[in-house]
Amino acid sequence: MNNIVFKSIKLFLEVNFYISVFVLLAGCLLSVSDSYSLFQFNEDLYGALDNNLRIIMIYLAMTETMILIYCFFRHNFQVMIPVGFFLMMMIASMKIYGETNAVEIDENFSLFFLYTGLSHLLYGVAVRIEKNSEDKQKQNHH
């Protein structure tokens, strides 16, 4: 029974993880466009920093893509634990960026990074628990 519950939770976390990957990539790539962006980039408010923030989002999409490729080739998604922490730390980083540059940052960034970060973190933890469980079973059989 415990195994079925864990597998169900892991499946939910995995589906949610892939949705969050899509949201992250789409949110970052759509930041290039004023018309389709999930975030408000008010050029009057941001001025020259407007493009800096957009470029950061493009780099984030590229980094996410490279990490995913690495995970698929290595068949190891435990690295999503630090990625999740990094994404959640972006909430504070964006607040510091806004204060340092005296600009308001769209509150949607906080929700965006909280959702994607937690999704990555929880999926990475589920993968690690599963791997540890498999390792213990292998040790018990030897």
Image: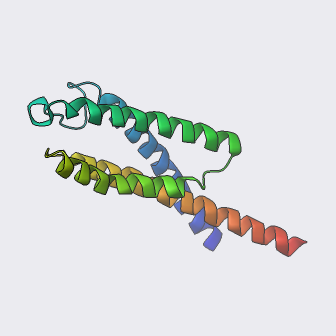
Quadrant containing the C terminus in the rendered view? bottom right
Q: Locate residue 5, reporting x and y percent.
A: 57, 68
Total residue callouts? 0
Determine whether, in the image, residue 93 is placed left or right of residue 108: right
Q: Residue furthest front?
A: 100
Q: In the rendering, at what x and y percent does residue 123 appear?
A: 52, 56
Whether 136 is drawn above or below 34: the answer is below
In which quadrant is the N terminus drawn? bottom right
The residue under the point 38% across, 40% down is 23
- The residue depicted at 23 percent of the width and 53 percent of the height is 95
118 or 85, which is in the foreground? Answer: 85
**Residue closer to the observer: 95 or 7:** 95
In this rendered view, identify the residue nearer to me: 102 or 60.
102
Q: Farthest residue to the left: give it.
A: 44
**Percent x, y of residue 42:** 13, 33
Please tell me which residue is depicted at 33% across the width and 31% down the height of the picture: 55
Left or right: 132, with 98 as reference point: right
How far across and how far down the image is residue 56, in percent? Answer: 35, 37
Q: Residue furthest right?
A: 142
